[in-house]
Every structure is written in structure tokens, then in C-alpha cells.
Image (cartoon, grey):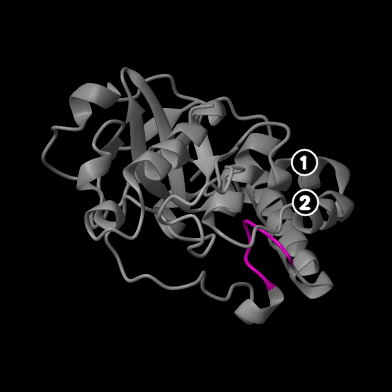
């Protein structure tokens, strides 16, 4: 059974954050969805662009975007604030087991992460194979999250403006955007926070421990709305 993914009926985000029950499915426009590092799911997203123009796009992305620390991950100046030299994959607002990105597509992490460089040629090939396989599968049998689960993540909120931080399903998101879908179905994982709110930086785990300066944490958050 194909999943209808262009439906306009979607819960009101602000109101639904107080909902108690089975996780809701939100039908969000691609421009609301972002990959870690604040890469928006539009035509210039590295995965979406690679599906359109080929693996050379990913090669260039991983070569040009190879941050050495958390400040470089978000294009922020290194001014000596606490947390700037942490690993690029750190997230100030999540309390979780802190570890590097896991190995994917059968390759060890020594080949690189999927959302920043550097990456080996084998990693680029594996990422392209995964992306193209998803597009081919959706074209052949439709999108079937009822079998493989929904794209998952959590909301970021700045006033009345929302973004959705994609934490699971980043390749599926790119495939759907590439295929031209105007609404992408996502849900919040039950074990993750529902929303991170701008202005609450002093409460974020890595800020509370003193590992990340609150001003620097706020600058990272703002990148997702720039």
C-alpha cells in the first residue's frame, strides 16, 4: 500500500506539542526540514543535489565541508567561547550518549560521516547507492513508512517559527524531496525531546555542565533559522 504523502492535513505544531498519546505524523514542507549542520532540504542540499547532478556533487561537498570542530561545523568564528573546539557532531541541547556518528552502509567510521567530510571514495559511492536505491524503490512500490518507520527527529522553535531537525531518515527525506513531494511525513521519536526552544540555552545539557558557552550554543541554534 502506498502512503499518501502530499496530504495537507497536519497537526497544528504548537498545539500538538502538548498532546499525550501515540506519536503524531506531521506533513511538513521540505524547507522546514534540516540535516545536522543546518543543511536545509532544498535543491542545494548535498543529498538532493547529488540525486539530481551525480556523485561529483557529494565529492565536492565532503571536500569543501570538513569541519575540525563544532565552531567550523556551523561556520562560526572561533573567539574562545567554551565549546567551540568540541567535535563537529556534538549537539548542545541533547542529553544522550555522546559518541561519534555510527558506521553506515557497511563501512567503518574511518570512511567518514554522512553529513560532513572528509569522506573516502568508498563512502561517496555507498551514499550514492543508498540514495539511488531509495528513489528507485519509491518509484517502484511507493513510499511505505508503515513497514520501515517514519522519518524521525524533533522540532526547534524560535518564537512562532519552527524547524524540524532530522535525526533518523535523512536519506529518505532527500529521496522524497528529489521526487518533488511538497509535504514530507515526519514524527517525533518517543525517546527524544519534542521541541527545543530558543532562549532556553541555560537549561541545555552541555551548557549546564559548562562545556558549551550559552552564547555559542545560541549561535548554533540560530543557524537552523538563518
Residue positioned 88% across, 53% down in the render = 56
Helix, strand or loop under label 1: helix
Q: Nearer the viewer, mark 2 or mark 1?
A: 2
13 vs 189: above or below? above
Q: Nearer the viewer, residue 226 or 140?
A: 226
Dots 2 and 1: beta carbons under 8 Å?
yes
**In the depicted view, which residue is nearer to us: 225 or 130?**
225
Residue labelled with disc 2: 61
The 10 Å Cα crowd at callout 1, few under 14, some 14 to 19, many 20 or more, is some
Spatial CA distance of label 2 from label 1 is 10 Å
Coordinates of residue 104 in the picture (x, y in percent): 59, 72
Task: Determine whether, in the image, residue 114 is placed left or right of residue 145.
Answer: right
Give how far across and how far down residue 162 sits, in percent: 38, 26
In reply to whether residue 13 is colored magenta, the answer given is no
Q: Which numbered dot is residue 49?
A: 1
Of 146 and 1, nearer the camera is 146
Span highlighted in magenta in the image? 112-118
Residue farthest to the front? 80
| Label of residue 184 in the image | none
Q: Is residue 4 visible?
A: no
Q: Which of these two is toward me, 131 or 164?
A: 164
Residue 214 visible within the image:
yes
The number of callouts visible is 2
The residue positioned 57% from the left and 25% from the top of the image is 182
Image quarter hosting the C terminus: top right
Residue 38 vertical placement versus 55 (above, below):
above
Instruction: State the predominant SS element of the stretch in magenta.
Output: loop
Amino acid at each position: 500500500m502506498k502512503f499518501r504523502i502530499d496530504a495537507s492535513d497536519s497537526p497544528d505544531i504548537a498545539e500538538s506539542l502538548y498532546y499525550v498519546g501515540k506519536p503524531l505524523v506531521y506533513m511538513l514542507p521540505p524547507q522546514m526540514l534540516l540535516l545536522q549542520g543546518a543543511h536545509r532540504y532544498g535543491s542545494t542540499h548535498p543529498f538532493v543535489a547529488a540525486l539530481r547532478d551525480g556523485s561529483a556533487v557529494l565529492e565536492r561537498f565532503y571536500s569543501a565541508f570538513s569541519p575540525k570542530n563544532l565552531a567550523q561545523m556551523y561556520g562560526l568564528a572561533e573567539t574562545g567561547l567554551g565549546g567551540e573546539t568540541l567535535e563537529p557532531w556534538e549537539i548542545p541541547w541533547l542529553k544522550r550518549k555522546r559518541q561519534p556518528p555510527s558506521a553506515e552502509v557497511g563501512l567503518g567510521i574511518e570512511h567518514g560521516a554522512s553529513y560532513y567530510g572528509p569522506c573516502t571514495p568508498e563512502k561517496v559511492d555507498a551514499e550514492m547507492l543508498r540514495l539511488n536505491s531509495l528513489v528507485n524503490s519509491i518509484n517502484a512500490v511507493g513510499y511505505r513508512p508503515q513497514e520501515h518507520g517514519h522519518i524521525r527527529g524533533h522540532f526547534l522553535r524560535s518564537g512562532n517559527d519552527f524547524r524540524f531537525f532530522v535525526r533518523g531518515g535523512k536519506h529518505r527525506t532527500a529521496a522524497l524531496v528529489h521526487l518533488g513531494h511538497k509535504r514530507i511525513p515526519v514524527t517525533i521519536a518517543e525517546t527524544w525531546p519534542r521541541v527545543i526552544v530558543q532562549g532556553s540555552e541555560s537549561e541545555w545539557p552541555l551548557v549546564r555542565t559548562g562545556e558549551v558557552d550559552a552564547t555559542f550554543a545560541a549561535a548554533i541554534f540560530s543557524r537552523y533559522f538563518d
